Amino acid sequence: MKIWMFDNCAFKFSQMIGDYWRSKGHDVRMEMGSNPQACEPDVDLIYIDWMDQNFYYFFNGPNADQGTHFPKKRIAVRTIDIDIWQGRHRDPSIWKYLDDLIVINQFYFDMITKETAPYSDGKIHLIRPGVDMARFTLKENRDRGYKIAMVTGNIWEAKGVFEGIRIFQEVARLYPDKPWELHIRGQHIMPEWHQFAYDKLIENTGMADRIHIVPQLGDLELPIWYATMDYILVTSHKEAFSYAAAEGMAAGLKPVLNNWFGSEWPDKYRFNSIHEAVEMIGEGDFKPLEYRQYIEKNYDLKRMLQDYDQLFQT
């Protein structure tokens, strides 16, 4: 099968799918951007990651050729969360060319199915994300430690980083006999005033020496870094999944996750207030093997790839 993959996010999530298809002998091409004319005429499957402007221009941009280029090809799109709220799935015209829309959690599956019922029948599929468990190891006899990890990718309002700093501040105040540290991995994409406020908040905690900003890490460095942490704190206001939570748990970190709308994480891993988050970190159980086994059972990469096989008959 000849597969052409388009991505506007440097294949951050779709790379593993492309690598898998290549391992099965398929001819896979990867293209950054949104030019449908890049596809060769005999392509069998066009796969677009994220329903963003990349996706929309594919059908409506200046290079689009809906009359001859698309109808003979199978076109699949995977959507995450921010792109869903942009509402492009509500445009009836795209469903003339779209064969498969992959959604990664039940909340968004139900929402999109309801909103597009007149024209999307049978085209929406729920395939939950997967984590490559082999990348992450669980240290033997791991005891409770005091390093809290936040992994935001990009630091902006929706990631709730300010709340994370407040939670750390309260943990250190209420449990002062422990050497707590907060490690934030991410990069700023917000205006200058936002970064100034962020830096000032850290300064005002009086614990700037215990709050560490970590640069983006490569695929080989990330599992090593997780192995040095003890908790994975996710304060996002919205997520469709949270790879940070899943990869942290795969490495045995205790999850402390904001109860964002549509979350599928178990209640015992979620908090609804700063007080609850602080309590989850400072007290309660600490079961690294349980956290890893939960990801292995529910979000193993092998299962996700099997779902892709079943959908596309690859």
Image: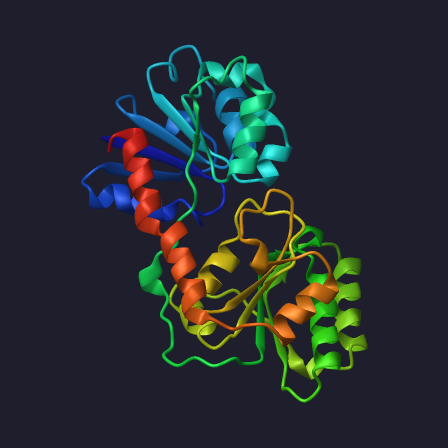
Judged from this view, the residue extending furthest toward the left is 25
**Residue 211 on image: x %, y %:** 66, 77
- Which residue does the image show at 55% across and 44% down from the upper left? 240
**Residue 223 on image: x %, y %:** 41, 68
- Residue 218 at least partly seen: no
Judged left or right of residue 233, residue 251 is left
Q: Is residue 238 above or below residue 31?
A: below
Judged from this view, the residue extending furthest toward the bottom is 177
- Which residue does the image show at 30% across and 49% down from the upper left? 302
Name the one closer to the observer, 185 or 81.
Answer: 81
- Residue 23 at least partly seen: yes
Quarter of the picture holding the N terminus: top left
- Which residue does the image show at 54% across and 17% down from the upper left? 117
Q: Is residue 64 above or below residue 136?
A: above
Judged left or right of residue 84, residue 298 is left
Q: Is residue 284 above or below residue 90?
A: below
- Which residue does the image show at 65% across and 49% down from the upper left? 260
**Residue 148 on image: x %, y %:** 59, 73
Name the one closer to the observer, 211 or 26.
Answer: 211
Judged from this view, the residue extending furthest toward the top is 67
